[in-house]
Image (spheres, rainbow, N blue to C red):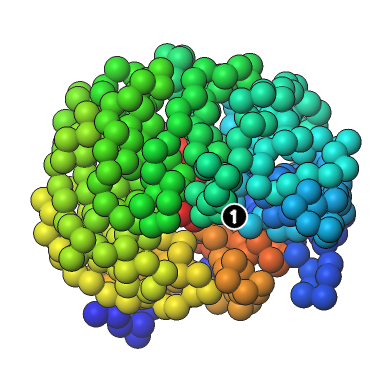
Amino acid sequence: MNNSSVAEPAILYRKVRIPDAFISEDSDGRWGGDIRIGDLTGDGNVDFLVYKSLGGMKPSFLGAFTGEGEPIWSVGDKDFTAADADSTDTLRTHSPDRPGPVAIYDIDQDGCSEVICFLIDSDVKRTSKWNLDGIDLVILDGKTGEIKQKAAPAELRRCNAYVDDELHISNYAHQRLMLANFTGTLQPQDFVVKLGNEILAFDRELRLLWQYTNRWYRYSQHSAYIPAVGDLDGDGRDEVNGGHFGLDHDGSVLWEKYLGDNMDAVLVEEWDGDAGNGKEAILSGWGQVLDGCGNTLLKLGEALVPHGQEIRYGDVRSDSPGAELVIRYNGHHPDLMVVSNDGEVLNRFKVDDSPNNTGLEIIRWNGGNAADLIYSPAALYDGYGRKVVTFLDLPPPTGGKMGWYHCFPANVCGDEREEVILYDPCSDAVYIYTPPPFDPTAFCGYRHTPRQYNARLID
């Protein structure tokens, strides 16, 4: 069922224009790049970070700006170029091929946000987009952009898209910093990133904690494009869910087995209702849930989930106990299913087509004990498949397959209900939508949670 007649328009709280100094222009128009959100200035309001990448893969420019569109600082060169080591061409800086290794988070727990990211060395003259040569790890002061920490670990710079001299682009193109607690601190102060076939964990001093080499890298038998982190065993430290593998906080193997095709997306969430034994590993490939040792708790199977492109977890059905899975089960198509906590397929429905047919998210649009809604570019649907919220004044997406509206759920301007922050990496503005009725006096400050700093974005 997909009944658009019940849809109501969201309120456009603010259209935030990316500062002109951070905008690039070419034959396709004006564009900013990929976006991150967080309180960079410490004033209790959401700020934004736009970044661009050399060759689409190597971050080379970052620009911070306020929720009013005022520039705060910038680092790097938005027009940076380098000779392409793989051809006679020139690599140019443009919007990232995928959301990449850039995160906003208070990693040193001093009360102020930092930007943790990869950044290409400005002295690089010739490089390949298929390896991490010339890349530094940096931690920037959120208020000023000044470098607080910088490192060039040899283990990181050796990472590339090749296995046995064979190029595996799909396995390499997704590079996301996921903040985690591996060392047992009160709050996460470490991070993990998957770089081609390697998974590397670092602490807040940018020291390598451990490294793991993935066994499954061939499309479509690959491990998760972007690992998920969370406490799978209840010991207060985070583990890594990579789909076909699970890693303990110290990088030791919890499970390592092939579990199904198209393991595009994974989560770590509380599934079985027993928080004391840790959370569970959720896998898009064939629609599965595992315990912290890799034992199967639920498996929908290939017939029901032939290509698990994306998977999310939220309480989207008030008539079903517990939270539900929402799965984009048929690859890059607008087909979604909702699955109950006991494994029953409650319904299937189609959302609107979008350029890449990705971009699934759970939104706490109505707050409180009300059912969550499902974002798929660019509308909100309820757990029955009805389109219930539309976003007026949102321009059509641009930039072809990778030009579509990514979504951050966050409380940025009102009560406990979440707003929807939308951006197209090939456009020049960010759009903040809020549910009616809007009461700005109810706002008590932006809170930065894993739903923002470890946002899934695209799988």
Residue that mark 1 sits on = 98
Where 335 sits versus 220, above or below?
below
Q: Residue at 80% across / 32% down in the picture?
A: 144
Which quadrant of the figure contains the N terminus?
bottom left
Assess disc 1: are there few (<14), some (14-19) or many (≥20) residues with their C-alpha within 10 Å of its C-alpha.
some
13 to the left or right of 285: right
Measured as percent of width and height from the top left, residue 399 is found at: 66, 72
Query: Can the viewer see residue 376 in this picture?
Result: yes
Measured as percent of width and height from the top left, residue 190 is found at: 52, 23
Where 393 sits versus 112, above or below?
below
- View extreme (bottom): residue: 5
| Residue 278 or residue 259, whichever sits in front | 259
| Residue 439 or residue 432, whichever sits in front | 432
| Residue 218 or residue 365, whichever sits in front | 218
Measured as percent of width and height from the top left, residue 137 is found at: 69, 29
124 to the left or right of 434: right
Where 289 sits versus 276, above or below?
below
Q: Residue at 32% across / 32% down in the picture?
A: 246
347 to the left or right of 239: left
Q: Amino acid at mark 1?
A: Arg
Element class at badge 1: loop
5 to the left or right of 297: right
Measured as percent of width and height from the top left, residue 280 is found at: 25, 36
Q: Residue at 42% across / 56% down in the picture?
A: 219
Q: Residue at 24% across / 54% down in the picture?
A: 287
Residue 363 sits in quarter: bottom left
